[in-house]
Image (cartoon, rainbow, N blue to C red):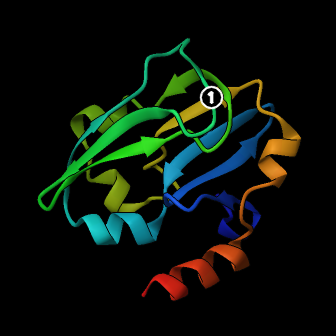
Amino acid sequence: MDQKQLRYTRDHEWIGMDGDLAVVGITDHAQAALGDITFIELPVVGKALKAHDVLGVVESVKAASDIYAPVAGTVKAVNAALNDKPELVNQQPYGEGWICKLADVSAAELAGLMTAADYEAFCASEA
């Protein structure tokens, strides 16, 4: 996905629209901080999430971290490839390493998240 078209959270998730579904993943910044990812707990298809709900867990050689829903929506698909190859999140966080897809996402809620420029500034301020 084009990183400049995505929206970002302070918890280092990204979200972008692909047709009528929103694709969710963790950012390159997050995967780099975590180190080698060894396991991803994916959400359950059909689960309704509110913004900031825990949608899954990412485990790495350094730590385990919750993955939060950037916006409210219903899980319509998960990236089952991550069950066998969680390292895809390290290798392609904005491509083959996506986590899940959400339906029924509010455009207003999406617009309230950080732009790519906002997220870069946020990460720089954390350093």
Viewer-nearest residue: 48 or 102: 48
Query: Which image quarter is the N terminus in?
Result: bottom right
Position in image of residue 119 (x %, y %): 63, 73
Q: Is residue 83 left or right of residue 109?
A: left
**Would you place residue 83 above or below residue 13 in this image?**
above
Position in image of residue 81 (x %, y %): 35, 35
Q: Is residue 49 left or right of residue 22?
A: left
Task: Give amino acid for label 1.
Answer: Lys
**Would you place residue 42 above or below residue 37 in this image?**
above
**Would you place residue 58 above or below residue 5 in this image?**
above
Q: Is residue 30 left or right of residue 48?
A: left
Residue found at x 80% / y 31% = 20
Could you say which quadrant of the image residue 2 lies in?
bottom right
Which residue does the numbered mark 1 point to in the structure image?
50
Instruction: Using a 10 Å C-alpha cutoff, classify the residue at mark 1 as few (fewer than 14 neighbours), some (14 to 19) or many (20 or more).
Output: some
Viewer-nearest residue: 27 or 64: 64
Viewer-nearest residue: 32 or 92: 32
Position in image of residue 51 (x %, y %): 63, 36
Viewer-nearest residue: 48 or 86: 48
Query: Which image quarter is the C terminus in?
Result: bottom left
Q: Residue furthest left?
A: 61
Residue found at x 32% / y 39% = 57
Q: Residue furthest top?
A: 46
Residue found at x 46% / y 49% = 96
Q: Secondary structure at mark 1?
A: loop
Q: Is residue 105 left or right of residue 76?
A: right
Residue found at x 14% / y 62% = 62
